[in-house]
Amino acid sequence: MRRTAAVVPAALVLAFVLALSGCGNEDTTSGSSSGSGSGRESGRMDMQEAAERSDAMLDAVLEAVDPDLQWAHGPTTTRACGVTRRRAVMTVVSADRRQTFLDRAEAFWRKSDYRIKAVNKDEVFPAVYAVTEAGFGVSVSFRGKGQAFLEADSPCVKESKVAPPAAEPNGPAYEGVYPLPRPDVRSDFWSGPAN
């Protein structure tokens, strides 16, 4: 009897974690979900619709960051029940401007009622991560050579084909180029003095 009592709470914890993750109990054929309200909402959405919403989220944060940055589409990836859209910043962002970029993205997300999930204050690879009420995750992170990347991850949605992003980059498209080149566009504000 004691052994059963110990197993039941563990099973409940596992079920709770899977429900929070959004993907554990998704029925992609019927669009139903046994998760929270956001899981049920995303169950009515397919991967293409989720990709379009992700694109809109990335467009919005890039428009909110001033002055403008040049960007290009990164690869789109799909997983069992979700989709990720990516943008790569092609403007050189100097080390002393990285935090400014992150602060402006974070301020926009807070104003848009996103929940800030985590902030990485690393000097070389800082990042900020947020989540929407509908369960979309969005982030800005700095990686190799100080290049900034934006990502938007959908919650679990119905499986469907996913078209390439419709938005035109505000610079070269780099279609079929992978990996994308390192940032090479200089900005008086973002890039600082040339080294």
Image (cartoon, helix red, strand yellow):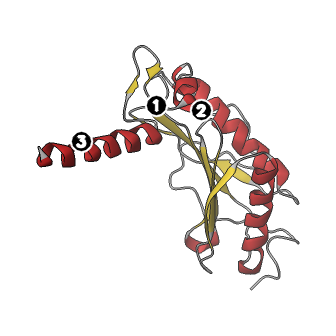
Q: Earlier in the sequence, mark 2 or mark 3?
A: 3
Q: Residue 108 shows which numbered tag?
A: none
User: Residue at the spot x=67%, y=37% of the render?
Assistant: 55
Label 2 CA crowd tier, 10 Å (few <14, some 14–19, many 20+): many
Q: Position of residue 44 (x, y in %)?
A: 55, 18
- 149 is higher (above) or lower (below) than 28: below
Q: Position of residue 163 (x, y in %)?
A: 57, 27
* Label 2 sits on residue: 51
Query: What is the secondary structure assignment of the residue under circle 2?
Result: helix
Q: Could you say which is closer to the camera, residue 132 or residue 142?
A: 132
Q: Amino acid at mark 3?
A: Val
Give the foreground label among 1 and 2: 1
Q: Position of residue 13 (x, y in %)?
A: 34, 46
Residue located farthest toward the bottom when viewing the structure as drawn:
195
- 120 is higher (above) or lower (below) than 132: below
Q: CA distance from mark 1 to mark 2?
A: 21 Å
User: Residue at the spot x=79%, y=73% of the render?
Assistant: 191
Q: Can I make out residue 185 in this image?
A: no
Q: Assess whether mark 3 and mark 1 are in contact (beta carbons under 8 angstroms).
A: no
Q: Earlier in the sequence, mark 1 or mark 3?
A: 3
* Label 1 sits on residue: 35
Q: Amino acid at mark 2?
A: Ala
Give the foreground label among 1 and 3: 3
Image-quadrant location for residue 90: bottom right
Quadrant where the N terminus sits is: top left
* Label 3 sits on residue: 8
Q: Position of residue 178 (x, y in %)?
A: 50, 52
Query: What is the secondary structure assignment of the residue under circle 1?
Result: loop
Q: Could you say which is closer to the camera, residue 61 or residue 67?
A: 61
Q: Could you say which is closer to the camera, residue 8 or residue 173?
A: 8
Give the foreground label among 2 and 3: 3
